[in-house]
Image (cartoon, rainbow, N blue to C red):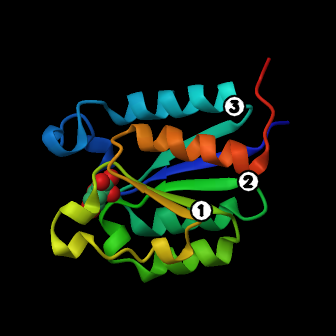
Amino acid sequence: MSQIILVLNGPNLNMLGLREPAVYGHETLADVEAMAVQSGQELGLSIECRQTNHEGQMIDWIHQARQRVAGIVINPGAWTHTSIAIHDALIACEVPVLEVHISNVHRREEFRHHSFVSKVAVGVIAGFGTHGYKLAISHFAKLLNAKPAI
Ligand code: DQA
């Protein structure tokens, strides 16, 4: 059985493709999730994708990931900048975390410069567009030394 990587997207990311395309691009969330699954297949990882606009739901998924998944790729959306609860859930879960932002949050508004998630993440990818998800998955493959599917 290949190891599971959970790809979590937070609020408003269901609007990808429609939402501020100049900032977030034209790809939809379905496109991003399909690309993530495909990358996982190539790298020998099993990818599970979820998105929610409800913080409690996100926290429940993070808790359920404990001792079940090998890694979490998370784009917490605006909760990045506000949520101590997601920060605490990620610590409680004890699974390595890679934080992804489609945009370069550091060249945007001041309120996007602080992340509660970065403190508990192995690494942060920002400003690489949706390619950032693929970069995060391939980094997990390296970290976990997964064997590519034949
Ligand atoms: C985002 C950046 C956040 O500041 C914003 O609230 C988002 C998306 C990104 O992917 O660039 O919803 O996480």
Report helix, strand or loop for mark 2: loop
Q: Residue at 18% across / 36% down in the picture?
A: 18
Q: x, y percentage for residue 61?
A: 58, 60
The residue under label 1 is 97
Of 148 and 62, the residue lying toward us: 148
The residue under label 2 is 70
Of 91 and 55, the residue lying toward us: 91
Q: Amino acid at mark 2?
A: Ala
Ligand 1 within 8 Å of the CB at mark 3? no
Of 107 and 65, the residue lying toward us: 107
**How busy is the neighbourhood of tag 3: few (under 14 within 10 Å), some, or many (20 plus)?**
many
Q: x, y percentage for residue 120?
A: 56, 74
Report helix, strand or loop for mark 3: helix
Q: Is residue 41 left or right of residue 89?
A: right
Q: x, y percentage for residue 119?
A: 50, 77
State the separation of the CA atoms marked 3 and 2.
Answer: 14 Å
Q: Residue at 42% across / 77% down in the picture?
A: 116
Q: Amino acid at mark 1?
A: Val
User: Which badge, 1 or 2, comes first in the chain's sequence?
Assistant: 2
Report helix, strand or loop for mark 1: strand
